[in-house]
Image (cartoon, rainbow, N blue to C red):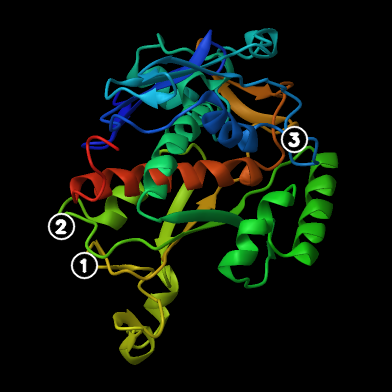
């Protein structure tokens, strides 16, 4: 397995869904950064299961522990180790279906790749549970990005075919008060209704999350193989259930003419900017100073209450499968802070590579 990402700001994730813990090691974090458990906890709490119609009934406290790399409230320059214990575990939910391949999950591919030795309870290493580690690392990255004024927000723009209307950046920042992280109240209400009806059907829903980073310095990115958008897409695709990533106009650019898709350059407040932002803040794999805009497609939750056809890998025979565990009807809302975290991790790494964040913060 490859469980690390980043060149200078290196994040190594560990742990499984139903193991003793999930955790992360952040190597390369500059010394002198003020950092407390509360800084990490507030981001992790945003990812926790809520009381809404979309959420799982699994209730983890997700208490963050700082095990290393911080002394007297400041990072030391040594690797920062962050950990969350797994407490609300029900292995019995999976014992009866151990050899039955769950459609949509990584059961078959993981079994074949690791010879059946992979941890399979709750999906093990392939569970959405590991995204708690991404959020912990992202909280550290966000603190570093604050030093250079970079702001990152994400919000739900579509669930179950219900599309939110366009909103301004400052309105998106208020989306955290909405259970679905949707900045459009009318759309959120419709999304909630379709989630509730889908739960009654024993099914699940997917959607789209948009992430925006503002005040990104010009020049982040290392072409040709370490493009900013390429590395960010890689980070976002590491989130379980993300099946597509687009920047700016994205796939819509394929239906535009060059005169429609090109962003004209203008001078505003003695700065070169673009009149539009179809490029999503990235040209040639390098940030151009405009807001970085990315959207991710999240597939419907694979674990559903409906009976499904599958194969028993031990018997090599077709069988029926009914999953009885605790699962989100729609994981989109809980993935919003994860998208923010992966954007922060990527931007922090590139900012350090550009020399914009010092090795010692004073």
Q: Residues within 10 Å of mark 1 (few under 14, many from 20)?
A: some
For the residue pair 293 and 148, the one nearer the viewer reads as: 148
Question: Disc 2 marks which residue?
Answer: 223
What secondary structure is found at the residue carrying circle 1? loop
Q: Residues within 10 Å of mark 2 (few under 14, many from 20)?
A: few
Residue 245, by quadrant, is bottom left
What secondary structure is found at the residue carrying circle 2? loop
Quadrant including the N terminus: top left
Left or right of 17 on screen, residue 6: left
Question: Disc 1 marks which residue?
Answer: 284
Q: Residues within 10 Å of mark 3 (few under 14, many from 20)?
A: some
Going from N to C along the chain, the mark reached first, 3 or 2, is 3
Question: Disc 3 marks which residue?
Answer: 50
* Marker disc for residue 316: none
Alpha carbons under labels 1 and 3: distance apart = 40 Å
Most extreme residue toward the left, as rendered? 224
Check the image and report above or below for 214 versus 347.
Answer: below
Q: How far across and down, in percent of the image, does residue 252 sit?
A: 44, 74
Circle 1/circle 3 CB separation < 8 Å: no
Going from N to C along the chain, the mark reached first, 1 or 3, is 3
Most extreme residue toward the front, as rendered? 362
Going from N to C along the chain, the mark reached first, 1 or 2, is 2
Alpha carbons under labels 1 and 2: distance apart = 7 Å
Circle 3/circle 2 CB separation < 8 Å: no
The residue sitting at 19% across, 46% down in the picture is 353
């Amino acid at each position: 397995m490859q469980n690390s990402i980043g060149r200078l700001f290196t994040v190594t994730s560990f742990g499984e869904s139903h193991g003793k813990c999930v955790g992360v090691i952040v190597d390369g974090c500059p010394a002198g950064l003020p950092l407390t458990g509360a800084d990490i906890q507030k981001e992790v709490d945003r990812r926790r299961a809520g009381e809404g119609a979309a959420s799982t009934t699994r209730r983890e406290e997700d208490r963050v522990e700082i095990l290393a790399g911080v002394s007297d409230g400041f990072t030391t320059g040594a690797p920062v180790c962050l950990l969350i214990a797994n407490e609300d575990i029900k292995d019995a939910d999976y014992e009866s279906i151990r050899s039955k391949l769950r459609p949509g999950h990584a059961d078959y591919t993981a079994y074949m790749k690791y010879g059946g030795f992979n941890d399979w309870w709750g999906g093990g290493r392939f569970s959405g549970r590991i995204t708690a580690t991404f959020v912990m690392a992202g909280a550290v990255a966000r603190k570093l990005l604050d030093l250079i004024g970079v702001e990152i927000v994400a919000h739900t723009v579509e669930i179950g075919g219900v599309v939110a209307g366009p909103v301004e950046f400052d309105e998106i920042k208020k989306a955290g008060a909405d259970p679905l992280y949707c900045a459009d109240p009318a759309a959120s209400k419709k999304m909630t209704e379709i989630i509730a009806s889908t739960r009654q059907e024993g099914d699940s829903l997917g959607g789209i999350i948009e992430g925006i980073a503002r005040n990104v310095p010009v020049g982040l990115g290392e072409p040709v193989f370490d493009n900013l958008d390429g590395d960010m897409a890689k980070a976002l695709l590491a989130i379980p259930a993300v099946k597509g990533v687009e920047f700016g106009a994205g796939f819509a650019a394929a239906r535009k003419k060059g005169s429609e898709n090109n962003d004209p350059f203008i001078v505003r407040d003695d700065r070169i900017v673009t009149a539009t932002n179809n490029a999503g803040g990235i040209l040639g794999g390098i940030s151009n100073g405009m807001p970085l805009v990315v959207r991710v497609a999240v597939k419907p939750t694979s674990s559903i209450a409906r009976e499904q056809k599958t194969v028993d890998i031990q018997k090599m025979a077709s069988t029926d499968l009914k999953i009885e565990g605790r699962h989100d009807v729609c994981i989109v809302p809980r993935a919003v802070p994860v998208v923010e975290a992966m954007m922060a991790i990527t931007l922090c790494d590139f900012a350090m590579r550009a020399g914009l964040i010092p090795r010692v913060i004073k």
